[in-house]
Each structure stands twice: as structure tokens, then as C-alpha cells.
Image (tube, rainbow, N blue to C red):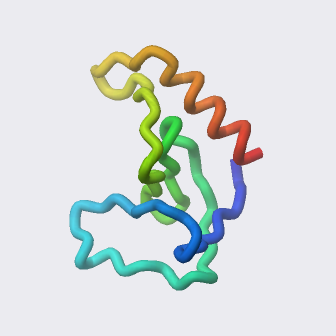
């Protein structure tokens, strides 16, 4: 899924999750990143290792590590993949 995600900071509500915000400066408004994969219904992984999670959107979690997935988690992930294609 090699799609380009433009960081429209003025109109999009998202944050980049990282353990240390101080060392993670915001990208310029015209920066582009490649989506490496869809993590779940509200989180994307970028090719440079960053994660983008959409705020004000909360979807059920998919199974990861030893934790079971929540009901409709895979459907939420599939819906986001469909919206990005």
C-alpha cells in the first residue's frame, strides 16, 4: 500500500505518536510521507517509522502481541484501507 499522505496540518486533526515529542518536530505543511501500512482503524504507520493516529476517531483495536482483538476491529481496519485506496 504505497500511497502518499500529505500533511495538511491546518485542516487535519492528527498527532504523530512518539515517546519523546521534543525530538519529533512537526513536518512542514507540504511534507509528504509514504504510508507503510494501516495499523488499525485509526492508526497509520509511515515508511520513516512514525505513526499517525487520527484524533477524535476511536475504533476497536485489532489483535496484536498477546492481546485479542475487539469486536469489529478488523472491519474498522478494512474500512480505513478502503478509504485510502
Taking the spot 40% from the left edge, 63% from the top edge, the residue there is 16
Q: Residue furthest right?
A: 85
Q: Relative to 69, say whether 13 is above or below.
A: below
Task: In this rendered view, identify the residue nearer to me: 31 or 42.
Answer: 42
Count of labels shown? 0
Question: Does residue 76 appear to the left or right of 4 in the view shown?
Answer: left
- Residue located 71% across and 42% down the image: 83
Image position of 65 with respect to 11: above or below:
above
| Residue 29 spot, x, y in % from top left | 57, 82
- The residue nearer to you, when weighing 56 against 23, is 56
Residue 76, above or below 8 = above
Residue 72: x and y, percent? 51, 18
- Quadrant of residue 68 in the image? top left
Residue 71 drawn at (x, y percent): 45, 15
Q: Is residue 30 left or right of residue 71?
A: right
Q: Position of residue 49 (x, y in %)?
A: 44, 60
Q: Residue at coordinates 71% horizontally, 47% vertically from top-left?
A: 84
Residue at point 46% right, 33% down?
59
Quadrant for the C terminus, please: top right
Amino acid at each position: 500500500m504505497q500511497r502518499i499522505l500529505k500533511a495538511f496540518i491546518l485542516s487535519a486533526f492528527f498527532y504523530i505518536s512518539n515517546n519523546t515529542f521534543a525530538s519529533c518536530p512537526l513536518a512542514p505543511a507540504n511534507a509528504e510521507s509514504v504510508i507503510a501500512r494501516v495499523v488499525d482503524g485509526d492508526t497509520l504507520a509511515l515508511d520513516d517509522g512514525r505513526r499517525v493516529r487520527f484524533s477524535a476517531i476511536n475504533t476497536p483495536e485489532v489483535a496484536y502481541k498477546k492481546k485479542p482483538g475487539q469486536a469489529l476491529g478488523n472491519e474498522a481496519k478494512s474500512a480505513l484501507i478502503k478509504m485510502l485506496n
